[in-house]
Amino acid sequence: MTAEIAKASSPPPLKWEYATSTEATDILDLESRYGLFIDGEFVKPRSGKYFKSINPATEETIAEVAEAGDADVDAAVGAARKAHTEVWGPMPGAERAKHIFRIARMIQERSRELAVLETLDGGKPIKEARDVDLPLVAAHFFYYAGWADKLEYAFPGIRPESLGVAGQVIPWNFPMLMLAWKVAPALAAGNTVVLKPAETTPLTALLLGQIASEAGLPPGVLNIVTGAGETGSAVVSHDDVDKVAFTGSTAVGKLIQSQLAGTNKKLTLELGGKAAHVIFEDAPLDQAIEGVINGIFFNQGHVCCAGSRLLVQENIHDRFVDKLKKRLATLRVGDPLDKNTDVGAINSRAQLDKINELVDSGLSEGAEMFQPDCVLPDRGFFFKPTLFTNVAQSHRIAQEEIFGPVLSILSFRTPEEAVEKANNTPYGLSAGVWTSKGSRILWMADQLKAGVVWANTYNKFDPSSPFGGYKESGFGREGGRHGLLPYLKWSEG
Ligand code: NDP
């Protein structure tokens, strides 16, 4: 047989594409319109206003959600105060623990439903919502349930007491997880809560309100007021709120801090970050590639501790970047409900605009961009996984939080230079180090001005481990025993 005949009769090369594997949404029982969760029930907003919560992957409206005005926030704070004075404050810790355990169990039982709704409302890949967010959410409620009757052992020598009403404002990147980080310790410490979820992702918090109610949580202990920034502002500035916990942008964090100056309110702020991810020449390179990918493309890079500035030792820079580009080309971008998807939808049009603006600045300032050859869906908000090389320390993409799937790559020669560059940012939330030398890990951890330093791994979370920042990344710790402290006052012995 001639070569031509053989070629003509051989079958076309097989394409090894992933078959679509879409998570079903029929587990959800969605309302077309949601009220505010105040005093144990869903109520119409006194403001009379509603806004739409959309699916960022399709731009379709999922439901209308109430917009809480000042009178609604006042009602929620009033319910929380009454519940604290009459029920939750005086309740023995062991009884509070039972309530929190029950919520944790119900979160586990309904985790698929919560994960699907989280993905639908926020755009994150279902495999992340299902395998990371929801297990961690349940773990936080279990963990803090365990502390509720042991507060005096948590802090020996002091007599801890609850503060009263906690006003909590959370962002859209981890709607359920941020809720768990805030609500679980507040309740365990004996406080009641008024929570304001982000405008673009209110639905899972509302479902959690329903779950808490079904779990028998007394009315008024947890109140959920939906709305935009004005609602958040009404919560944090309400006179009868004793403690404010905020996670979000540094700009809004600063505003809240100035609003609260001169008041008696306790404040914790978990703000932005621009984490350095440092790769030394002796690092296990293939594992480091996976760590870098997880560090910046997990949740589309909408992560305050995302490893968004990669610092690679100069003698391995080119090899490492080549490997990274090859790995980038294998990421599956698209429908967040598809179980194969690695990079889902950008949370909102506004966030997509912000990413585009910063990426344009990177190009105009002279950095070199690489994006894999992937096709984005026709509808919805999507952005290709992106790398920038030839980045200077002064570039905006090396200084500002992009909060998207965009990695800025710089190089260094010595450990001292790596530290100098890593710390050259107003933020100080997290960092990552990859090296095979234990002594270098310890030295780096000591030098890096970051609340969390991961070594030979990235984005690892555990409810028993405190998390929080330095400098413009905020103050106060969430998670662990430390996470109880902002919700307590105490008298000696
Ligand atoms: P914001 O700081 O604006 O929002 C965080 C939360 O605060 C939301 O619930 C928001 O409501 C609310 N809020 C807004 N204004 C006020 C106010 N004046 N008083 C009280 N609460 C307020 O962050 P964005 O969501 O707009 O994101 C912007 C940038 O912030 C991102 O690009 C990212 O850089 C950073 N960010 C950092 C996060 C982190 O985890 N560290 C998380 C999210 C964002 P609403 O949603 O309705 O605006």
Image (tube, rainbow, N blue to C red):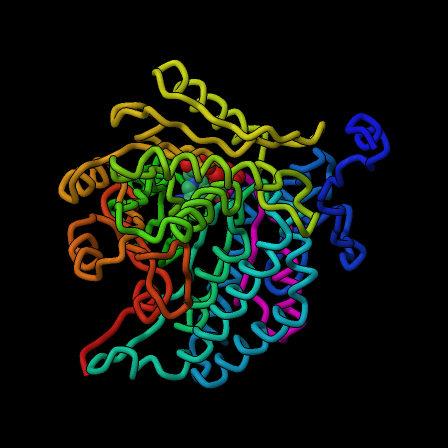
Q: In which quarter of the view is residue 75 placed? A: bottom right
Q: Quadrant of residue 113?
A: bottom right
Quarter of the figure that contains the C terminus = bottom left
Instruction: For ligand 1, give the image quadrant.
Output: top left
Q: Residue farthest to the left?
A: 416
**Is residue 237 in view from this perspective?**
no
Q: Is residue 493 above or below residue 480?
A: below
Rendered residue at 77%/29% (across/down): 3
Queried whether the magenta region covers residue 267, the answer comes back as: no
The location of residue 324, given as percent across then percent down, is 44, 39
Q: Nearer the viewer, residue 492 or 343?
A: 343
Residue 160 occupies quadrant: bottom left
Percent across and percent down for residue 490 are: 25, 73
Residue 303: x and y in percent read 44, 45
- Residue 280 is at least partly visible in this image: yes
Quadrant for the N terminus in the image = top right
Q: How many marks?
A: 0
**Percent x, y of residue 220:** 55, 65
Could you tell me which residue is drawn at 78 percent across and 54 percent down? 24
Q: Nearer the viewer, residue 246 or 230?
A: 246
Q: Residue at x 20, y 41 (%)?
A: 418
Which one is in front, 153 or 323? Answer: 323
Q: Is residue 429 left or right of residue 194?
A: left
User: Who is closer to the viewer here, 323 or 474?
Assistant: 323
Q: Tell me if residue 227 is in the magenta stretch.
A: yes
Q: Residue at x 81, y 29 (%)?
A: 2
In the rendered image, the vertical position of residue 421 relative to residue 143, given as above or below: above
Magenta stretch, residue numbers: 202-231
Horizontal side of 220 relative to 433 (left or right) equals right
